[in-house]
Amino acid sequence: MHPITRALGVAFCGGALVLSTQTWSAQAAEIEAGHVETIDWKPCPEDATAECGTLELPIDYAKPLGEKFKLAVARRKATEAARRKGILLVNPGGPGGSGVDFAISAREHFSQQIQASFDIIGWDPRGVSRSAPVNCSQDLLNGSPSGFPASQLEFDALAAYNRELRDDCRKRSGEIADHTDTGATIHDMDAIRRALGEQKINYYGVSYGTLMGQQYAERYGDRIRAMVIDSNMDHSLGTWDFAATEAQAFESSFQEWVKWCNRTISCALHGKDVVQVWEGLLAKADRGELANPDNPSRKLTARGIIGRAFGSFYGPEWKDLADFLAELDSQQPARHMSFGDEEINEVFQSAFCSDWSLPVRTFAEYKALTATENAVAPHVRGGLLGHDAILSCVGLREKVNNPQHKLNIRNAPKILMLNALYDPATPYSWAVNAHRQTKDTTVLLTYEGWGHGVYGRSECTTVTVDEYLLTLKMPRISRCAAVEPLDKAVLAPVSSKPPAGPAPRIPGWNR
C-alpha cells in the first residue's frame, strides 16, 4: 500500500472572529434549507470498477438561486457491506489536487480494512479538473516574470502580471474563478453528505486538504464521526511567519538529505562534500553553465535545481535527487521532463489568494521578507513554496473570501492530526500551532521522520490511523519512529502526471 505524497504572526481579534462565525452560521442555515439533489452514479470513464457522478451546486453560496456548477464526485463502495461504517470523504491537497482521481485510486492508498469498512468518496474541488475548472493561458503562465524582482519596477511588473493572470483565468473560466476558496468548499463537502443521505461523515485530508477538514470541523463539527488531517496547514499565520516557517521547513529537509548522503553508500554523492557540490552547481547555474534537462536549448537556473530538490523532499526521493545532481556535476545529460498545453487548469492563484491575505505591498517590504527567508534557509536561498505562494498574490486585493483566523473547533469529536518532523511543505510547527489552538478537540501524532504525508509510512502510522477510523479509539502513543527511506521511494504520487494545479512552476501542497 502506498500513502499519498505530493502545505505567531498576525492574529485576528475576538470580535472579528465572532462576527465571522455569526455570518457563517446564517449562511449555513440558509444553505441547509436549500434542496440538494441525489447523485446519479455511473461507472467512471477512467475505471469502471469505481462510480462517478455530479452534484449541481451554487457557484456563490451567498446567492443560492444564482448560477450553478457541477461538482464531480467519485465513489468506491465498501468491499464488505456487513462491515460498512459509513462514508470516508478524502482529499489529496493542492489547492488543485483531484479528489476524483484519489478515490478512483483508493486501493493504492488505503489499507484493506479501510476499503472494507467505508465507501471512499472523493471530489474535485470547485475550479479543479472536472468541477468547472479554472483554466488559464499556458503561454501567459510560461511567460511569468521573475518571482525575485530586483527593483521596484520589476516588483510592479510582477503585480501587474498577477492581475493579468487573474483576469485571463476569469475570462476563460467565468464566475467560478472568484469562488474557489475553502470557505465555499466546506459547504460543497456538506452537500455531498446530504446528497448521500448520511448523518455524519468520516474524513481523511492531506496537506491543503487539512484546511478543508479544519474548517469543516469549525462549521459542521456535529456532522463528523471521525476525522484524520495529515500534514497540517496553519491558517492563523500572517505574511512573515508564513514565509519564515515555510523556508525553515525546506532548509531542515535539505539538511536531513545531506545527513542521509553522508551515512548512505548508495547516495551518488557519498564521500563528497555534499553541500560544496550543491553550492557549486547553483553557482554554475548562476553563470549559465548548465543545460536545462527539461529544455536542452535553454540553461538550467539555480531556482530550477532548488525546485527539483524541493519536489524530491516530498517522498522523500533522496537517491533520485543525488543521482540527478551527480549527473549535473559530471556534465552528463539529466533525465527529461516536459510540460505544456495551450490552456491549463491553474486554480492555485484563484484558490490560495482567496484563502490567504499575505500582503507584500512595496519592493522595500519584499526585500525585508526575502532577507528573513534567506536568514533561516541559506542553503536553499530562502526556500520555494512559501515564497512563490506569497508572490503569486502580490498586486491582488488584500480583502479575501476566507481570511486567516485561529482555529475554533467546539462541536466536534476528537480529531486525529498527523505530521512529520521534517516535512518540506507543511512545517511541523504548523501542526503544533494548529493543535495548540484546538487542544481540547485534537490529538497530534508525530512521525519522527521525513516527507509530506504520514499515513502509510510505517506500521505504526498505518495501524494507528486505521484503528482510530474503525473504532474511534485515540492512540495511546504520541510519536511513531522514523523509517529510513529506501533507495527507491516507498511512497508513490497520486498520479504519474503533473498535478492539475498548481502548475509545475509553483509546487503546491500535493504532488
Image (cartoon, rainbow, N blue to C red):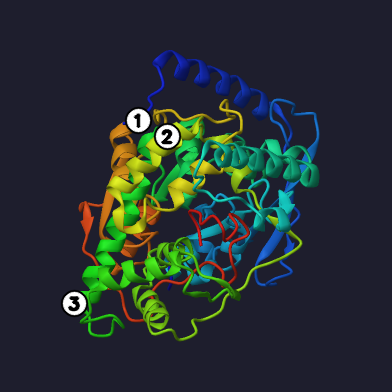
> Viewed as shown, does residue 313 lie left or right of 202?
left
Mark number displayed over residue 263: 3
Marks 2 and 1, Cα distance to the nearest angstrom? Answer: 7 Å
Residue 304, compared with residue 432, is above or below; it is below
The amino acid on which the numbered mark 3 sits, given as a three-letter code, is Arg
Q: Amino acid at mark 1?
A: Gly
Q: In the rendered structure, which disc, 2 or 1, sits on the residue that comes first in sequence?
A: 1
Residue 57 in view: no
Task: Identify the residue at image location x=39%, y=56%.
Answer: 470
Residue 212 in picture, x, y percent from top left: 51, 42
Can you identify the residue that label 1 sits on?
Answer: 9
Residue 406, position as x, y percentages in the image: 39, 29
* Quadrant in the rendering for residue 344: bottom right
Q: Residues within 10 Å of mark 1 (few under 14, many from 20)?
A: few
Q: Name the image quarter holding the N terminus.
A: bottom left
Q: Residue at x 57, y 61 (%)?
A: 504
Q: CA distance from mark 3 to mark 2?
A: 37 Å
The part of the image, by quadrant, that contains residue 143 is bottom right
Marks 3/1: CA distance? 37 Å
